[in-house]
Image (cartoon, rainbow, N blue to C red):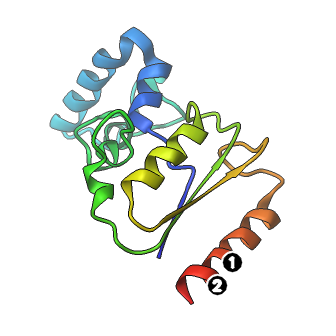
């Protein structure tokens, strides 16, 4: 089985955070990687967190990266269509990194054949203060679907 916790669209988030500077940020990170500076931090204005390396930035923000393609909710989600094992997808209703998580759960349920979804009301991306509830939910899903 596969469990996906808060599978946010990182490319969409990057575009939202960087706005009209997104394309420029991609060019800078690609240039840094080409010059062998892939482990060097990107300029501070384009870093989502301190000391974000150029190659890590691209893995998150570049729509051509493998992780950039996986949860591109505006795309075909081809990588997910072939998953045949049982899948559990969980979002917090107040996920700060993903707009409209309830809609994303519906999309994923329609894309993957054997997909269960769960929305934790009033919880964020990190499921802070509902860790016990989350772990119980996961254990119950494993008992029902896998064992």
The answer to whether any part of residue 45 appears in the image is no
- What secondary structure is found at the residue carrying circle 1? helix
- At 81% from the left and 57% from the top, the residue drawn is 130
Mark linked to residue 85: none
Q: Residue 35 in the image: state x and y as whole percent.
A: 17, 34
Label 2 neighbourhood size at 10 Å, few (<14), some (14-19), many (20+)?
A: few
Q: Classify residue 134 as left or right of residue 96.
A: right
Does 12 sit above or below residue 5? above
Q: Residue 108 in the image: state x and y as whole percent.
A: 45, 51
Of residues 75 and 23, the one nearer the viewer is 75
Residue under label 1: 139
- At 36% from the left and 39% from the top, the residue drawn is 72
The answer to whether any part of residue 114 appears in the image is yes
Q: Nearer the viewer, mark 1 or mark 2?
A: 2
Of residues 65 and 33, the one nearer the viewer is 65
Q: Residue furthest left?
A: 34
Q: Residue 102 in the image: state x and y as whole percent.
A: 60, 41
- What secondary structure is found at the residue carrying circle 2? helix
- At 55% from the left and 35% from the top, the residue drawn is 98
Q: Classify residue 102 as left or right of residue 10.
A: right
Q: Are marks 1 and 2 in contact (CB under 8 Å)?
A: yes
- At 56% from the left and 30% from the top, the residue drawn is 99
Alpha carbon separation for disc pair 1 and 2: 6 Å
Does 58 sit above or below residue 116? above
Q: Residue furthest top?
A: 20
Question: Which quadrant holds the C terminus?
Answer: bottom right
Residue under label 2: 143
Q: Residue 62 in the image: state x and y as whole percent.
A: 29, 34
Of residues 67 and 116, the one nearer the viewer is 116
Quadrant housing residue 33: top left
Label 1 neighbourhood size at 10 Å, few (<14), some (14-19), many (20+)?
A: few
């Amino acid at each position: 089985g596969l469990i996906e916790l808060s599978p946010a669209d990182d490319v969409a988030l990057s575009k939202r955070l960087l706005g009209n500077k997104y394309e420029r940020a991609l060019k800078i990170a690609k240039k840094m990687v080409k010059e062998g500076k892939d482990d060097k931090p990107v300029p501070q204005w384009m870093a989502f967190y301190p000391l974000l390396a150029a190659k890590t930035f691209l893995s998150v923000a570049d729509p051509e990266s493998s992780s950039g393609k996986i949860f591109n909710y505006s795309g075909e989600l081809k990588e997910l269509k072939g998953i045949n094992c049982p899948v559990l997808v969980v979002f917090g209703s107040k996920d700060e990194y993903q707009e409209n998580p309830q809609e994303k759960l519906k999309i994923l349920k329609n894309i993957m054949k054997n997909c269960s979804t769960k929305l934790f009301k009033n919880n964020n991306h990190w499921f802070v203060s509902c860790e016990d509830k989350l772990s119980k939910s996961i254990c119950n899903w494993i008992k029902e679907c896998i064992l």
